[in-house]
Amino acid sequence: MRLLLFMTLAMAGAAAAQPAGFRTVPAETVLWQPIPNGQGAQSALIAGNPSQPGTYVIRVKFPPHVMDRPHSHSRDRHVTVLQGRWFAGTGPDFAPDKAQALPAGSYMFHPAGGVHWDGSNSDDTVIVQIIGEGPVSSADVDPALASWVKLPG
């Protein structure tokens, strides 16, 4: 709730200086929040709300050697790598050594229900931007395992 209030105020202030309908989020105003049990991973809501109908934009920051385990989402998602080398794999078997390394500027489409896992499998901090339509939910392939893992460096 605090994140949404901050984003609303930040966007309202930026909107006042622009023609109607335009919004900006300067990099220095992006509010990073820790992901619970995320091994240091953080997320930031840029626009919209993934739990509500409509388009949303979020960013996820992976510290070095932190990845999430196989999971899926209920709706399509579009992922762009903004910083670092993002490592992504598909399917239910978590195999960081077989992940595809995608440098900044790369894009990956996650179809609804498509099982994948991703993060930083290097000394790089990685930031990705995700665009999708809400409401969206996520499901771990094996809920008995921790969703996030810190790999040996």
Image (spheres, rainbow, N blue to C red):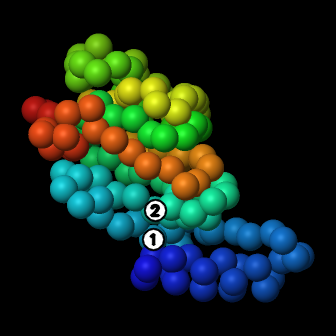
Amino acid on which the number 1 mark rests in the picture: Leu
Q: Residue at x 52, y 83 (%)?
A: 5
Pointer 1: what residue?
31
Quadrant the N terminus occupies: bottom left
Is residue 84 found left or right of 4 in the rendered image? left
Image x and y of residue 137, in percent = 44, 49
Is residue 78 found left or right of 90 in the rendered image? right
**SS for dot 2:** strand
Q: Residues within 10 Å of mark 2 (few under 14, many from 20)?
A: some
Q: Residue at x 51, y 61 (%)?
A: 51
**SS for dot 1:** loop
Distance from disc 2 to disc 1, alpha carbons, whole Å, reads 6 Å
Image x and y of residue 111, in percent = 54, 29
| Closer to us: 22 or 104 | 22
Answer with the quarter of the image where residue 114 lies. top left
Q: Residue at x 34, y 41 (%)?
A: 139
Q: Residue at x 55, y 55 (%)?
A: 135
Amino acid on which the number 2 mark rests in the picture: Ala
Pointer 2: what residue?
44
Earlier residue among tags 2 and 1: 1
Image x and y of residue 134, in percent = 58, 54
Q: Could you tell me if the residues under marks 2 and 1 are in contact, i.e. CB atoms within 8 Å?
A: yes
Image x and y of residue 25, in percent = 63, 68
Look at the image and tell me whether residue 85 can be seen: no
Position of 127 relative to 72 (above/below):
below
